Amino acid sequence: MTDDVILLIEDNPDDEDLTLRALEQNRIKNAVVVARDGAEALDYLFGTGKYAGRDVNILPHIVLLDLKLPKVDGLEVLRRLRADPRTKLLPVVILTSSNEEQDKLNGYSLGANCYVRKPVDFARFTEAVKQLGLFWLLLNERPPVPR
Amino acid sequence: MPQEPDQIVKTNAEGVSHKHLQGWRSPKSIQQRMIAMGFIIATLLLAFLFVMVYRTNSSFVRWNSLVVHTREVLGTLDKFSTDVKTSQIAAVDYYTNGSEQQVKVFEAAQADAHKTIAQLPPLISDNPTQVRNLDTLSPLADQALNLLGKVIQLHREGKAGADGLKSVNDEARRITPPLIKALADMIAEENRLLETRTAEAGITATKARRLQVGGGISAVVLLVFICLLFLRENSIRANVEGQLEETNSQLEQRVDQVTRDVTERKRLEEGMRMRTAQLEIANKELEAFCYSVSHDLRAPLRGIDGFSQAVLQDCGDQLSSQGKEHLKRVCAATHRMGVLIDDLLNLSRITRAEMSFQIVDLSPMAYAIARDLRAEDPDRKAEFVIAKDLRAKGDPHLVQVVLQNLIGNSWKFASKQELTRIEIGRDDSNGSSSFYITDNGAGFDPAHADRLFGAFQRLHSVSEFPGTGVGLATVQRIINRHGGKIWANAEVDRGATFHFTLQS
């Protein structure tokens, strides 16, 4: 089900592996597309660069967005997503190490759907990923596709 | 009144304007009015004295001239009397000795007597008594002189016998007594006048002297008084002017000082602006640093923990129990590092957070914290005593952090007691008001109290009581930012009491 892709935007390979591991442990079987910086994420979503020719109407089910990213940072990615009618309603979960008030404020202001801080403790991290999967992939109804 | 300028000068010291100061001269002081009055009185007195002395003097002169006049009358009368006597003696001598020489003497004396008596009427015309007396005297004198002439004639005619003389003698006896009486009356009257007039002149002279002396003395006294007033007024004026000058110079100095102050202040403000800008830059850098710490230091920790867990999960059966234990230790250390980083970030965030001061009631905050702590461990026996209305001015969020840390500490360090007892209240003794939180926990050695508020400083081991040692450092930062103070009293195993104030 290509519809059920999870877009993971994460530059740290450790965090990438750990996230994938947590997803796997929680039996979340969705395909995961990993973008290692903000520019790559935007290429994927808008079918440019490396992802030129991709059907941009097929949107990921959920975007897991880190804030501190090379090239284009997380908040900028979010701003561009929200500025584009195609991705305006796309569910975005900010998954970050930052606990800064300013990041939370900016994230929500720019239209993030939720903000989760990555715990250092892997067990708790796994739990957080599990809860996210349950909620966003099963419980939550997706927004209608804009026409 | 001398107080008046004093008062004005005094008010000036408190900042009355320059213009106001100069105006003190325009309303005449009572002192000045007294001087003017003194002058007027002295002038009037002198004028009065002058008139009085003038009048008394002229009176004296008048009386004196009357005395002189009386003396003249007396002199004339005396001369007349002498003339008559001279003529009588000459006539008698001629009659006795027949010397022709005596006839000439007689004639001359007779003429003199006539001439003298003729001088009297104008002299005594002002005195009716004397006029009457003269009227009596004049015919008698004429008769007497004629009789003496008759005696000479009788001798010449050789009829100087006793018969001839008899009629003359009879005539003389008839005339002489009234003549003597009339003359004596006139002299007595003139003597009376002389006495009266001399006395009057004397009285007037005494009066004039008294007036001159008394007036002179009072004028001198008055002038001395005015002079004293003048001197006093002058010294007051000099004093006030001195004060005025002093005040003026003080004002000038103050203006100079203010000018200098303003310049200095501008310089300081400029310096402050620069420092503020530098501080803002430093703050930004610190924020960036903290962001980096929170983000970048945590990621590797997560990796360490995550992959240790992965090893344990994936290859656990290949590891010895010791190997598993070591990996668990790695994870525990990682967690602790995570907590330390978070606490450090909180400490830094509290230092930077903007504060909004308002009246905060610590009592409900303390109740809520106590409730949460009880909920964490419902089976623990604990007693909270929280005073009501613990109000203070402060930032609500930061005060909440203080209470959370202090009550949390008490809760933690009293965990080994059978019954936990924590009291929160206000201490108004020692003349100041402070809040306190006291517990029956493990306490600490007062010798190490100075290390209590340092970051990462702990007085107990982690195995005994968990913690990072950032809590009290955070509390102290918050209290400092409120301008308050925090201090603690404790003994080992006898509990601890933390006092704090929020604003000095």
Image (spheres, coloured by chain):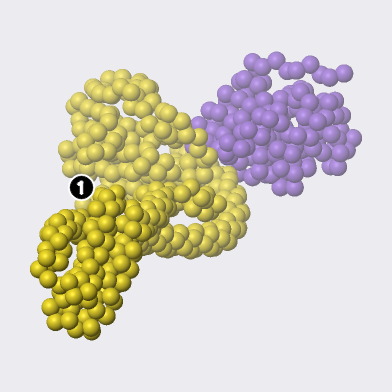
Q: Secondary structure at mark 1?
A: loop
In the rendered structure, the colour chosen for chain B is yellow
Residue B432 sits in quarter: top left
Q: Give the residue type that dot 1 points to.
A: Asp
- Name the foreground residue: A70 vs B31: B31
Residue B153: % across, % down: 23, 72
What residue is shown at x 75% (from left), y 17% (from top)? A143
- Assess disc 1: are there few (<14), some (14-19) or many (≥20) residues with their C-alpha within 10 Å of its C-alpha: some
In the rendered structure, the colour chosen for chain A is purple
Examine the rendering and report whether any part of residue B139 can be seen.
yes
Q: Quadrant of the N terminus of chain A?
A: top right
User: In the displayed structure, would residue B20 be above or below residue B68?
Assistant: above
- Name the foreground residue: B310 vs B194: B194
- Name the foreground residue: A33 vs B58: B58
User: In the displayed structure, would residue A22 be above or below residue B1?
Assistant: above
What residue is shown at x 40% (from left), y 52% (from top)? B44
Q: Is residue B109 left or right of residue B290?
A: left
Q: Is residue A113 left or right of residue B40?
A: right
Residue B411: % across, % down: 29, 31
What residue is shown at x 34% (from left), y 54% (from top)? B125
Q: Is residue B99 left or right of residue B376?
A: left
Q: Which residue is mark 1?
A: B445
Q: Is residue B108 left or right of residue B290?
A: left
